[in-house]
Image: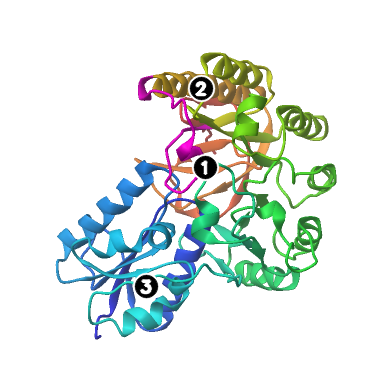
Amino acid sequence: MNSKSIAFHHFGCKVNFAEASALSRQFQENGFEIKDFHLPADVYVISTCVVTTVAEKKCRAAIRQAHKINPDAKIAVIGCFSELKPGELSQMEGVDLVLGHTGKFNLLEAVTGLCSTGNSVDPLPEKFIPSFSYGDRTRSFLKIQDGCDYYCTYCTIPLARGRSRSDTVENALKNAREIVANGIREIVLTGVNIGDFGKNTGENFLQLIRALDTLEGMNRIRISSIEPDLLNSEIIEFVAGSTNFLPHFHIPLQSGCNKILKAMHRKYNRELYASRVQKIRELMPRACIAADVIVGFPGETEEDFIDTYNFLQQLDISYLHVFTYSKRDNTLASKMESPVPDKVKKERSDSLHKLSDIKKHKFYNENMGSVVNVLFESSNSQGFMHGFSENYIKVKTPYNPDFVNKVLQVKLEVLQEDGYLVTF
């Protein structure tokens, strides 16, 4: 085909973003013009997510949007939705290509040769394919691991992305050096279950972060979401003693009730989770600690939810990511009895969102008056630019192009609803 303009749109996790960014670079290097997704293009690529029914609806809406913008455009749908439901997607108006997690890495060849509607039901990928983002942000998401062997009862990710597999320390370090060479000031290590790094290579996550700590020209490295059973004391102690790894932890909890954790097939209890938080607080009192929580899991009684709420209320974390349980086909949870009514789910979600706001406000206030290093981003939002401190506190200041991709030292003194306002 002769098309030379392409637009990408991704949904879901940082892994999706890193992969979509890497694919975008391939097309750019082969003469394609990269366009904004909301503008007319010859080809649209939509990287999909299936974590919730809402995520699926957004993916369908994006397909319809692309077809409306340019009815003659070729539309390629890739990612988790494509892996699980290729037939459903291929029947949508305007969709020309459906690729799962194996086929998507041949997207350039598939799009270049695309001339008719089709779909590809790929086998689940067995090989790790590295990717990372850069060029459109001040930070880069470096994919170090993919897939998952945990098979939690509510989750379709192992069905969509396959078994756990990861990069090597050597290759991850090579990609990190390329990121540094492109002027990126911060790296975020990402994957589906990053604590499982090295399971198939004889290495481990601690070896990886020790190697990355020696990386010249990079003194801002974040660890993205990591399972509490894999976040051991050695990792916490290493981050506490490093000048390059940032004091920021995202640790999925999912429930503060041990009965529900067991029903979810999680690999820990709440006591272990609390011990991880306590260890971080002992070594890094100002660290940011975020937790994922699911409300309305099948069989979650009012007593179970109160158990979770009380546990979270006393837990010294910074804020919550609250998710409402969404029934996913082909999971064990989808067959469980005693579903929680939607109205009750919403009430519980609202309650935890309010608790999260209280905790975040407390965390921000505890940092009042402290001096932090903020990496400012490029976007201009109503005359202001934003950035994040080492411990992930949001800061804004009047837009100044000279501050973009710069790490500046500021004192946190004026707290507004959307973060600290600082002036220079």
- The answer to which of marks 3 and 2 sits earlier in the sequence is 3
Residue at the image point whose x is 76% and y is 34% from the top = 276
Q: Which residues are magenta?
A: 321-343
In this picture, residue 244 sits left or right of residue 41 = right
- The answer for how far apart the CA atoms under marks 2 and 1 are is 25 Å
Which numbered tag is attached to residue 352?
Answer: 2
User: Looking at the picture, which amino acid does disc 2 mark?
Assistant: Leu
User: Looking at the picture, which amino acid does disc 1 mark?
Assistant: Leu
User: Looking at the picture, which amino acid does disc 3 mark?
Assistant: Ser
- The answer for how far apart the CA atoms under marks 3 and 2 are is 41 Å
Residue 329 part of the magenta-drawn span: yes
- Name the spot of residue 182 as percent of width and height, x first: 57, 70
Q: Which residue is mark 3?
A: 120
Tell me the mark number nearer the camera, choosing from 1 and 3.
1
In-front residue for pair 188/100: 100
- Name the spot of residue 126 as percent of width and height, x first: 59, 70
In-front residue for pair 58/210: 58
Which numbered tag is attached to residue 332?
Answer: 1
Q: Quadrant of the N terminus?
A: bottom left
Is residue 380 shown to the viewer in this render? Answer: yes
- Asked which secondary structure carries label 2, the reply is helix
